[in-house]
Amino acid sequence: MNDWLLFDAMFRIPFLTGLCLTAALCLVGALLRMRDEWLAALGLSQVAAAGAIAAAPLGLPGLVGAFGAAGLAVILRSSLPRVGNSHHALMILIGWSATLLIGAHIDHGQRIGDSLLRGQLYFAHAGHLAGAAGLLLTMILMLPWLSPRLLTARFFPDYHKANRIRVWPYQAVFALLVMTATVLGTISIGAFPAFAMLFVPSWVGFVLVDGWRQSLLATLAVGILAYVAAFVAAMLLDLPFGPVLTGALVLSAALRFVTAIRRRNAEISGDSLHTNYLAPAERPTRS
């Protein structure tokens, strides 16, 4: 099985590509959750899918169309004075409807749209692996610089203004990382599986431990374990990877509920060490 699953080049490159993307998406998802912007990930993934399918009749690579559409969405979003979940929901609706409408009027549009929604990790090649590895490396290198600035802006929004610190550099870098992670995730593992990886691991990991760094590690652990289990299960059972990954992530959410029940019982029994179940990102003093 090992030769067939991991050491054969046919499966090794897709596996490593998905692994790098999983780690990058988990880290980006943790930052999005900390900023309470997690719904933006689904909006961008749907817009990226629409851009990828729109590139087909123009003779352009899907990746170019996905980056173009996602970049336009990010620019429009940044130009708004205030952005909320209503705007993110509108992005989701626009992207979903555009994907289906464009796909209905081009050759093989339904098949292309289906691959974008479910993912096509099995067809990943060395170029995909290089892009995923580059994204992960960039995320790791930028995180020590980016994370404290985003945390400060989230919990002390007047700090930068009071100290005349420019906020656009790190906001632009963060927007670029979110866009890149979302586009690469959508192209490789699918729109909804990429959103699931951005959403679920941090949602679960933030309640398992205390502290920001520990929460990042817990988020990575949840995402990577779900990814490996999903990849093996999809190969063994000959199933499409995207839905299996999404199902594995949904099952991992049970950890959150088990932890909440245990802490609730500890509170009832008077154990003061387990009475605070707020996520670390919701506790400014613990950040």
Image (cartoon, helix red, strand yellow):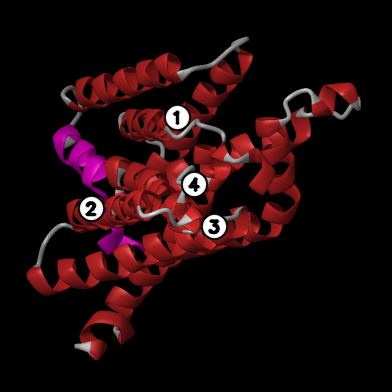
Marks 3 and 1 sit apart, C-alpha to C-alpha, by 20 Å
* Residue drawn at point x = 22 percent, y = 36 percent: 113
Q: Observer-nearest residue: 225 or 179?
A: 225
From the image, give the main secondary structure of the stretch colored magenta.
Answer: helix
Left or right, 259 with respect to 129, comes to left
Which circle, 2 or 1, is nearer the viewer? Answer: 1
Dot 2, how many residues are within 10 Å of its Cα: few (below 14), some (14-19), or many (20+)?
many
* Residue drawn at point x = 49 percent, y = 17 percent: 84
Q: What residue type is labelled 3?
A: Leu
Range shown magenta: 109-124
Asked whether disc 3 touches disc 1, contact meaning CB atoms under 8 Å apart, the reply is no
Residue 216 numbered tag? 3
Instruction: Look at mark 4 in the image and give the residue it sits on.
Output: 276
* Residue drawn at point x = 19 percent, y = 53 percent: 247
Tell me the SS state at disc 2. helix
N-terminal label among 3 and 1: 1
